[in-house]
Image (tube, rainbow, N blue to C red):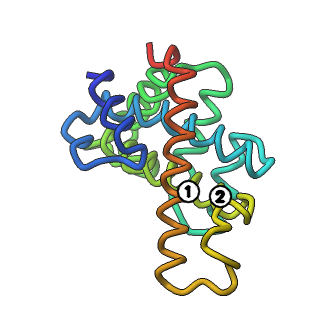
Amino acid sequence: MIVAADRLLQQDPFGPAELFSAVDPAAVAAAHWLAAAAEVAAETSGEHPTQVVLEADTIEVLPHETPTLVLGLLQDGATPHEAVTALVRHAMHITDGLLLDPKRPARDLLEDLLPGIHGRWLLRNASAEPDEDEDLGDAEDWDAEQAEEHQRRSHERFARLVRETAATHSDRLI
């Protein structure tokens, strides 16, 4: 099931709708992809991979507590499976629902991790070299269509880099 969720994220690192049909494995795969997105954003921004979550939150308000916690656990040597399992187990013991909804902890975790990937793209996009889309002209002169094309290209470049990084570290899924 983790492999199937990983394949869905390989097709769309930002989280396709089909991902929510396999919640527990999807959260594990999303943690792996979040780590890959953090590495890509860190390379561009110069921030530490565990800090890119907080930096991206200054660009667009996103859930950052859970992705930061997951990245910290991964940085400390946990596998995505161990990090997700620990958080889900912890959430099941919480009765007041402060961290995750105890009735659906794995799905809530997934819902926090996928925007984390989007946040890494925001940070990379804000930190990227301005000449990546020089064929569109000067960024200050872009019309709405050119700006949309830049966003689409940026999204595609980020997804490609995240796919490459996730593939490089595919062993952490096991």
| Vertical placement of residue 82 versus 60, above or below | above
Q: Nearer the viewer, residue 99 or 40?
A: 40
Q: Give me the residue at 63% from left, 64% from top.
A: 133
Horizontal side of residue 109 vs 73, given as left or right: left
Q: Give me the residue at 69% from left, 41% from top.
A: 50
Amino acid type, callout 1:
Gly
The picture places residue 29, in percent across and down from the top left corner, at 40, 30
Q: Name the residue under label 2.
A: 123
Verify CB contact (< 8 Å) between mark 2 and mark 1. yes
Q: Which of 96 and 106 is in front in this view?
A: 106
Question: At numbered mark 1, what does the secondary structure look like: helix, strand or loop?
Answer: helix
Question: At numbered mark 2, what does the secondary structure look like: helix, strand or loop?
Answer: helix
Q: Which residue lies furthest to the left in this view?
A: 21
The picture places residue 138, in percent across and down from the top left corner, at 70, 79
Q: How crowded is mark 2: few (under 14 residues within 10 Å), some or many (20 or more)?
A: many
Q: Give me the residue at 19% from left, 39% from top.
A: 21
Q: Name the residue under label 1.
A: 119
| Vertical placement of residue 89 versus 157, above or below | above
Amino acid type, callout 2:
Leu
The picture places residue 132, in percent across and down from the top left corner, at 67, 59
Q: Residue furthest front?
A: 135
Q: Give me the residue at 60% from left, 73% from top.
A: 136
The picture places residue 112, in percent across and down from the top left corner, at 44, 50
